Image: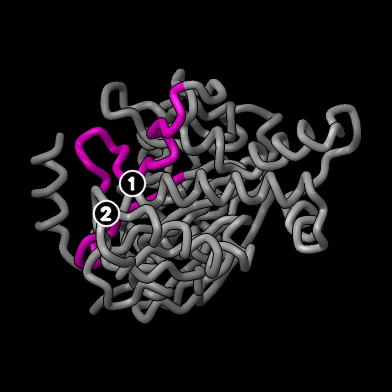
Amino acid sequence: MIRPTIGIDLGGTKIEGVLLDQTGSILHRERIPTEQQGGYEPVLNRILQLVQRLRERADGEVAPTIGIGTPGAISARTGLLKNSNTICLNGRPLQDDLERGLQAPVRIENDANCFALAEALHGAGRQAEMVFGVILGTGVGGGIVLRGRLWSGPNRIAGEWGHHSIDPNGPRCYCGQRGCVESLVSGPALEAAYRELAGHAAGPPIRVPEIARLAEAGDPAASAVIENWLDWFSHALANLIDILDPSVIVLGGGLSNLSLLYDRGIAKVAARVFDEGLHTPILRHALGDSAGVIGAALLAREQEDSPTRTASRDAALA
């Protein structure tokens, strides 16, 4: 019998936890503030307390493994967390400390991987052989799910399409390269491009939905920025399709709600892909902001479903 699983979505401002049943339905959900200003130990303790409350909510025994999704990842070299927006966790042995505090195994994955897993199993990518889940928001990330199982890769960076360069003369990315997809296609990149072109550099920030609305109304600067943004988006996604050729692509993150991605954006991708046409469905997410925490709980389900297979795979990649 498959037991309920616990998933934690660890963000910079909130920690969300769910208790998930075998059908993917949420039995209980709870959110608490991260309060990262208090430092590492208080955040660690908040996670431990939330997991304990979720355990107490279960009607019977839960799966032992706890799944956690967070921006960033566990370093394959050091075992420490890196690149998290909960800055106080970076460089700390989060997985070891959680396992010690919970007396249970913990699996930590990037939040884009959790999104992809949730959409592949219970969302827009259901029954597809290979799902590529895309995050378009403050950052640009992705995750790969093959035949219902997450593929992280030996370096634990599978799906990081946001950090392949598409313009060697483009803006400097925090990863050290120039012209990464993230530095050209993310929400902040689009907003910065509009401020520069429209001459609003010193004014209040203008968010992406407003820029899109201005473009629809015929504003020249907004129209030019949106067109250029769609060009970069299609360039990057066509590269991904040429290399990976997934069965379906599911878009998530704040920018995925822009309807223009699903007509003009897809048309531009089709014009760039290395084929006579585009046969890969590019779909809007189905699970909304629940995808990340559901995916975290599904990390635990992978272990519950096939512990021997998962252990053998992890040992081979160690």
Per the rendered image, the range of residues in magenta is: 141-168
Colour scheme of this structure image?
Answer: one colour
Front one among 88 and 226:
226
What mark, if any, has residue 274 been given in the picture?
2
To which quarter of the image does residue 11 belong?
top right
Q: Residue furthest right?
A: 203
What mark, if any, has residue 239 been given in the picture?
1
To which quarter of the image does residue 194 belong?
top right
Q: Is residue 148 magenta?
A: yes
SS under mark 2:
loop
SS under mark 1:
helix
Horizontal and vertical percent position of residue 224 = 69, 46
Amino acid type at circle 2 is Phe
Horizontal and vertical percent position of residue 43 = 59, 37
Q: Residue furthest top?
A: 176
Give the spatial CA distance, label 2 vs label 1: 9 Å
Going 84% across and 29% down the picture, which residue do you hit?
201
